[in-house]
Image (cartoon, rainbow, N blue to C red):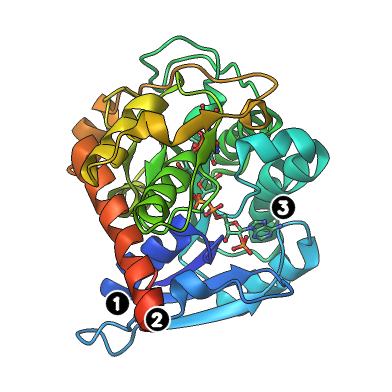
Amino acid sequence: MPKVALITGITGQDGSYLTELLIGKGYVVHGLKRRSSSFNTERIERIDLHPRHPEAHLFLHYGDLSDMGSLVHLLRQVQPDEVYNLGAQSHVRVSFDVPGYTADVTGLGAVRIMEAIRIAEVDCRVYQASSSEMFGAAPPPQNEFTPFHPRSPYGCAKVFAYWSAVNYREAWKMHVSNGILFNHESPRRGENFVTRKITRAVARIEAGIQDKLYLGNLDAVRDWGYAPEYVEAMWLMLQQPQPDDFVIATGEPRTVREFVVAAFDQVGLDWEQYVDTDPAYLRPSEVDSLIGDPSKARQKLGWTPKTLFPDLVRIMVDADRQLLEDERMGRLVRMDR
Ligand code: NAP
Ligand code: GDD
């Protein structure tokens, strides 16, 4: 019998890569998608079912992390072996504008999914998408023992979800693991996260269709990895006999400014001619420095990052240049470029 997985947030960056990984392993994958007024399945539209696994299938279902009933019905129907809770209002700056909504979906949503598993009496393993944003103001390097000090409504919601996951593990003996993932990027990254905003602008400036790139804090330090490798860590966590919590990171600190310089360098442009700062992109309270220590993941999961900063920047800039070229030539645009 093929394994069955349910993914919330399947239409997002990580959801799309995780779906590909699981389909490649022969899973039957069910995804929760929310209703939107325009198509929101672009990232997963062209996922190929794996030829070596004729039993692999992908099904999408309408539902919402704010709607308990839809979660209970879906769990009863799907009977998953593994649940990956990736759904969230995941933008930190936006969470200051919609703190209540962020708490509801990103925080309470995690409780709803775990409670729905209990109500539906499904025997499954659960991955909770926790975040380095929970560390916030705690000085780096951060690992599994670093106390949380969140600096945004998003970070606060993720701390609530994290401790709820731990509590479901302790109270109900559920196999629930927290992946504390540091920033991870790809050509599928949403266009309003800083890395993709930069690489998309570089391609457009090079093509002569954009003049300026406006950014906020250039001094923030982040630990940027490559998303396809991070979803593998999620899967590895659920293959462990015991549930546990893991930091997933590269350990390599870089500033936003370094990302800008590397991206403009790749196309031979002087970034200082094109980049300006705009206070609109500053945050009421910033997270200055996130640098992860992934030693536990290396030792217990055998997970190590392979794609580091220079390659990540190159992959993303190349993909955005190719995307523009495809659009210009009227070719079918693939998100995985
Ligand atoms: P993303 O691209 O923003 O995707 C978020 C997903 O959640 C999308 O599929 C979105 O649907 C869905 N969603 C939003 N509101 C929902 C709701 N009310 N009900 C159900 N689904 C909803 O995020 P990502 O980068 O893939 O990240 C995946 C998860 O990991 C998130 O929980 C994020 O907070 C967390 N995380 C990300 C990083 C990172 O660096 N990427 C690091 C640490 C933790 P639509 O497509 O319809 O918007
Ligand atoms: N988005 C954005 N836009 N960020 C900017 C900009 C800008 O124009 N200019 C500077 N920054 C800075 C932000 O202030 C922040 O310090 C850094 O760039 C990274 O911002 P984001 O790419 O938006 O990511 P994030 O670190 O806030 O949050 C991401 O990573 C978290 C893990 O640490 C998201 O994916 C979260 O969902 C995730 O949990």
Question: Around disc 1, counting alpha carbons within 10 Å, would you say few (fewer than 14), some (14 to 19), or many (20 or more)?
Answer: many
What's the amino acid at mark 3?
Answer: Arg
State the residue position of label 1.
26
Q: Quadrant of residue 277?
A: top right
Question: Around disc 3, counting alpha carbons within 10 Å, would you say few (fewer than 14), some (14 to 19), or many (20 or more)?
Answer: many
For ligand 1, tell me if the residue under mark 2 lies within 8 Å: no
Residue drawn at the location 24% of the way across and 36% of the way down: 309
State the residue position of label 3.
112
State the residue position of label 2.
46
Q: Secondary structure at mark 1?
A: loop
241 in relation to 335, above or below: above
Q: What distance separates the C-alpha of mark 1 from that of mark 2? A: 17 Å
268 in relation to 333, above or below: above
Where does the image place residue 20, in percent across and percent down from the top left? Answer: 34, 69
Left-right relation of 309 to 73: left
Number of numbered discs overlaid on the protein picture: 3
